[in-house]
């Protein structure tokens, strides 16, 4: 749930970010680590009016620290 007028952009909760951090910390020796999310972490500059998922920066820091290999995301609304 998001307090913005357009909740279709999505938002990661602090709990989701903490759970991802703990999960990938426990998977440090896995050969391949990936995260699948519905909303994007990056939006092309030529698409005005769209934005990345809320708290993307915080999750991206976790993914970099935990050496996640791939992030797969859905579509823009």
Image (tube, helix red, strand yellow):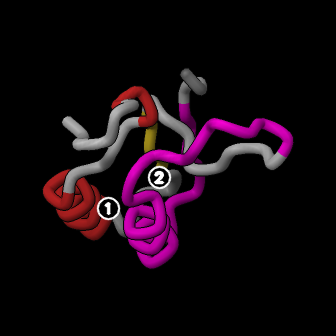
User: Is mark 1 in CB contact (under 8 Å) with mark 2?
Assistant: yes
Category of crowding for the residue at label 1, using alpha-carbon neighbours closer than 10 angstroms: few (below 14), some (14–19), many (at least 20): many
Q: Image height check: is 59 above or below 12?
A: below
**Which residue lies at the image location 19% right of the left edge and 35% below the top edge?**
1
- Give the mark, 1 or 2, whose residue is nearer the N terminus: 1
Q: Image height check: is 22 above or below 41?
A: below
Q: Position of residue 70 (x, y in %)?
A: 59, 49
Outermost residue, right side:
46
Q: Image height check: is 27 above or below 76?
A: below
* Secondary structure beneath label 1: helix
Rounded to the nearest angstrom, the CA distance separating label 1 from label 2 is 8 Å
Q: Which mark is residue 24?
A: 1
Q: Which residue corresponds to mark 2?
A: 33
Image label count: 2
Outermost residue, left side:
15
* Secondary structure beneath label 2: loop
**Which residue lies at the image location 32% right of the left edge and 41% below the top edge?**
4
Q: Position of residue 76 (x, y in %)?
A: 59, 26
User: In the figure, is residue 49 to the left or right of 6?
Assistant: right
| Region of the chain picked out in magenta, as a range | 46-73
To which quarter of the image does residue 56 belong? bottom left
Q: Is residue 56 magenta?
A: yes
Quarter of the image with the C terminus in it:
top right
**Which residue lies at the image location 85% right of the left edge and 41% below the top edge?**
46
**Which residue lies at the image location 33% right of the left edge and 45% below the top edge?**
11
Category of crowding for the residue at label 2, using alpha-carbon neighbours closer than 10 angstroms: few (below 14), some (14–19), many (at least 20): some
Q: Position of residue 21 (x, y in %)?
A: 27, 66
């Amino acid at each position: 749930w998001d307090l913005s007028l357009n909740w279709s952009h999505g938002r990661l909760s602090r709990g989701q970010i903490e759970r991802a951090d703990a999960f990938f910390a426990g998977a440090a020796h896995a050969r391949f680590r990936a995260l699948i999310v519905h909303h994007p972490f990056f939006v092309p500059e030529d698409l005005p009016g769209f934005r990345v998922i809320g708290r993307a920066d915080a999750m991206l820091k976790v993914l970099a620290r935990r050496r996640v290999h791939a992030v797969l995301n859905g579509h823009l609304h």
